[in-house]
Image (cartoon, grey):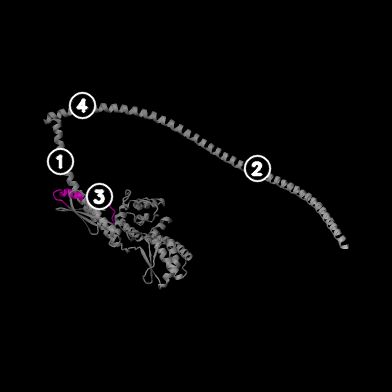
Amino acid sequence: MDVILLIPMVIVLVVLFFYLGWLFNSRIGKKSLVSAEERAKHILAEAQKEANNIKREKLLEVKDEWYKKKVEFDNEVNQKRQKIGNLEKQLNVREENIEKKFDLVIKKEKENKQFEKELSDQRKNIELKVSEIGKLEEEQNTKLEKISGLTAEEAKKMLVENLINQAKADVSHIVKEIHDQAKADAKKEAQKIIVQAIQRTAADHSIETTVSVVQIQNDELKGRIIGKEGRNIRAFEAATGVDVIVDDTPEAVILSSFDQFRREVARVSLERLITDGRIHPARIEEVVEKVRQELEEEMVREGENTILQLGLHNMHQELIKHIGRMKYRSSYGQNLLQHSIEVAYLTGIMAAEVGLDTTLAKRAGLLHDIGKTVDKSVEGPHALLGYELTKKYKEHPIVINAVGSHHEDIEMEHPIAPLVQAADAISGARPGARREPLEGYVKRLENLEALAKSFEGVAKTYAIQAGREVRVVVEHDKIDDVVAEKLAHDIASKIEGEMEYPGQIKVTVIREVRKISYAR
């Protein structure tokens, strides 16, 4: 019975406790909801306040920016107004000048009209005097016809024929004497001057090559030069612009390039890298750049030494740099600096022989090929490039003209110019001084023979003495002795105008006698 009573009581207690719990939770939930709504209202109020603050700040920033733009716009407008005002002033000045010139033109027109009137009056007076003189001449001629028994036309014709025949004979004789004497004297004097200049000048003639050989201690270094997967040799070729040839040649690496300066940079850099032992791409770039700077400084020193060697002074520093660059340039295989120094000496010697300024002559001879050192991107003949370069750095006008005219691109204005041209030809024409590729050499000889054979009456042509002489055999029934001499001159002139060649070419026309002319 006690257990039966206990169970309902427990159930009642559980229900009571459940109800009390539910009541408590509902009250707490209401309080939490009210608190959350209050917090939300507070957050919304704070957000609204912050949004208003940001809005005010942005409005202020926009106003500041607008004000700055307005100030800039005002300044720009003021500047343009000022420019317009200046332009208006200039226009006003020009209008005043035009009005003055217009008044001057009107004045000149009046003076010209007055002058034309005076000329017209003088012309009328002269015509009157001429008519009077004509009447007097007619009277005189009539009297002379009566005295001589000849008409005026007959006398005139007889006199003219006699005078023409006598003049022809006298002129031919005088011209022949003058021509023969001048030719003999000029040839003798020119030979004397050139021989003396050549005898007093001795220069080394070295043929430049396109490869340099770097000696190494052993063939194991070739692997280090090549590097892992060829990275060292690729970095070296990229930095120097030179082809590196590593082959079976014992204890040697070959550097190949047509640019002598690049090849020298590569040679010195490779020797330093081998001596140092550290060969990797970063070190290669560092050494190559350092060597390039050193060689550029050396070129400047070389130019200064050349100036001192020749006894020249007061030359622009940029021209001295270009002279130094000649050391790493070549012309037909001949070192350009040595060639220019030799031309300077030859020109100076010949100038002394004919009584010209030797300093200017040597200066012109040294700078005559300076255009060959100008950057390859600049197009044009090297003589005209040198002309512009020397003119830019305010060289003496005689030197500028000699540089620009030594290949006859411009007209020669001073006797020093042909001396430079002659010295250049002497230096380039010496045996061993220059070389040219076999293909170009053969083609030049073929062109020379074809050019000479293009003239009418030529039977055969032969280029001999390495292209320094062309012999022309003519058909005797078509070419006589007088025409043969003219043919030699015509062929020489055509060679000068259409071909490029070192030194000079002797043209020999062969018939019954030989007439010789030279293309210089």
* Residue 165 marker: 1
Q: Residues within 10 Å of mark 4 (few under 14, many from 20)?
A: few
Task: State which tag comes first along the sequence, 4 or 1.
Answer: 4
Q: Secondary structure at mark 2?
A: helix
Q: Identity of the amino acid at label 1?
A: Asn
Task: State which tag comes first along the sequence, 3 or 2.
Answer: 2
**Which residue corresponds to the image point at 47% horizontal and 67% vertical from the top-left?**
280
Q: Nearer the viewer, mark 3 or mark 2?
A: 2
**Which residue corresponds to the image point at 39% horizontal and 29% vertical from the top-left?**
109
* Cα–Cα span, label 3 and label 2: 83 Å
* Cα–Cα span, label 1 and label 2: 107 Å
Q: Which residue is mark 2?
A: 63
Q: Secondary structure at mark 4?
A: helix
Specify the quadrant of the image occupied by residue 268: bottom left
Q: Is residue 494 magenta?
A: yes
Task: State which tag comes first along the sequence, 1 or 2.
Answer: 2
Q: Please provide percent x and percent y for residue 230.
A: 43, 66
Is residue 297 at all visible to an observer of this figure?
no
Q: Residues within 10 Å of mark 3 (few under 14, many from 20)?
A: few
Q: Which residue is mark 4?
A: 135
User: Magenta span covers which residues?
Assistant: 474-502
**Which residue corresponds to the image point at 84% horizontal and 55% vertical from the top-left?**
20
